[in-house]
Amino acid sequence: NGTASGGIAVGALCFDKAIDSASLVGGGTASAITLYGYGGGGGGGAGSPATQKLALSSVGATATISPTNGSCATIRIPAVSGVGVDLDGFTVATVGGAAVKDVSGRASVQGAVGVTVPGTSTPEIRPELGETTGPKLVAVTKNGNVPMQLTYAFNRLLDPSVGGGSDYGYVQSNGTTVTGSTAMLGPAPYEVTVTFPGNVLNDSRYFVSPSASMTQTQDVPNPIDTLGGIVATRPTIAGVTPVTGALGAFDVTYSQPVTVADATKLVAYLEDNSTVPVTSGEITFPSGSSTMLRITFPPPVAPYASLITKIADDGGAVIAQSQPYATSVPGEGDITTPPMREGFTEGPDLINVALNPAAGTATYTFDGNYGSLDNLVANAGSFQLVDSDGTLSTQATSARVTGSNTVTAIFGAGQFANAVGGTISSGGVADYECGGACAAAQNLAPSTAAHTTTTTTTTTTPPTGRVHAVRVGLRASGRRISGGRTRVSFTGKIYLGHAFNPSFCYGKVNITLKHRNTKVATKTLGVGYRRCTFGQSITVRNGQLKNDGGRVYASFTGNKFVFPISSGAAVF
């Protein structure tokens, strides 16, 4: 539970075994915890100590054993400079090695878990169309008792410093722009009340200048934000769409015929609240169009153009072609919804490790939510294996990027004997947007993946049918059950989408398991929106897999719809 006032923020960090209370002396768990989130670009400061991360040791947090669950530690985070810590902006909690011990004295391994609303699996951060990591303007309401005021509501808790009144304004139906005189936080902690020089009249469109407000704790500023309808007397952005087949190109449609007045008033926002400026040389008008201008960003932008969530006009970017030749009002065209969700950050997040003892390699797979890995960055010193007793191997001898979101690390053959997973610490990889020079793009936390597959136990045939770019890792395990049968379980993960582009997906996948060309089981799996995982359990007669002399093969068919983030177009 986060806090918007000067109170104490409370969180519960739970492990898979009971915690020895003696290991919490001095709040040991709290001192080992770091929170991470979609906060890149934040300014931090005395009242808000974090940008993308918050080390609980820096804010005097304490930890005690939960009175209702001995496997959980209750974390209490005091206010900083009178401002309560907002947990809503954080999506991942990480712990360093030996954060706690169990009752047998065994220390915990470093790792990470997602931050959720208590008692649910719902992420605290809820992305919206066109959103960045900064506060997003979601509503503007009038104060019936004070006709000179408007209340601007955002989707995040705000820092008490909300800028001056001139940062907030509205456009009247006749095109006149009015800015505020004063602004103050409230009445709710996600709202700003703005007082104007006179009564608010004929208001039809609202705007907020960039950096007028910031998120509480992380201090990430808002982008240009606008709400409201078309202003008939002045050009207004009516929408923005990516150009099909031209990565990095966007068509911006206005409400009336226009010409370019000042290209610098146009700006594209990435999901991490960074901006891509527009120059006049990047603007053309598609053939036969006078209401639509096309922005084509240069090649360096193209690899991360799918991260652009919106394009905004700060006011005055274009001018009408007819009298009275009015300039455009502040506006924006929302393009995408960023893939912010529980358990992930803006950097590459580790989601799977596949061990291959025979080759002495481990393949680390990252989420790819924000683009491909930088092909030049793979720090072998950040990669380690995790043994079943929780200890870590020595660092990899080498590591290289082997796919859009995979890294293959080489270890000594003897290190695989007890390995059950892998971990990566800070700076192991970076995404393409910023490369090794951008801290916001780095995997900043220790991340442990125990979802391990062993390539020598099961192989898969190439995908068939209408399933696109499937990669799958299966691991088989068996046990005897009653009736002379053996229960064999196959578990793993399916990845769908283009090899160099993360995708949204839904539909069905048919899995067929065969042994020596004999079908032993089939399963139809429904894969929900952005949920490309599966678990499979089958029962076969005793002896059906006897004397196999080979492997169990899995083939995949089905009707799968994949939506690449870069274009939003369906692939069938």
Image (cartoon, rainbow, N blue to C red):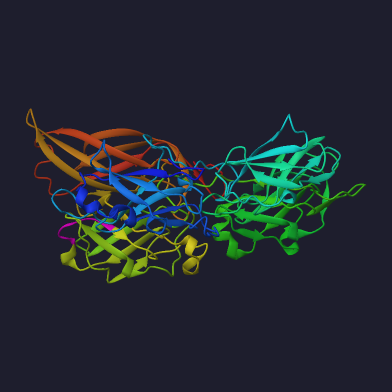
Going 33% across and 61% down the picture, which residue do you hit?
424
Query: In the image shown, does 82 or 504 lie closer to the viewer?
Result: 82
- Please say if 29 is above or below 572: below
Residue 299 appears in the picture as rendered: yes
Residue furthest top in the image: 483
Magenta stretch in the rendered image: 416-422
Going 84% across and 42% down the picture, which residue do you hit?
175
Residue furthest bottom in the image: 397
Q: Position of residue 499 (x, y in %)?
A: 44, 54
Q: On the picture, is 62 further left or further right than 550?
A: right
Q: On the picture, is 102 further left or further right than 3?
A: left
Going 32% across and 69% down the picture, which residue do you hit?
380
Q: Position of residue 322 (x, y in %)?
A: 90, 47
Q: Position of residue 166 (x, y in %)?
A: 75, 50
Going 52% across and 55% down the picture, which residue do you hit?
47
- Please say if 416 is above or below 237: below
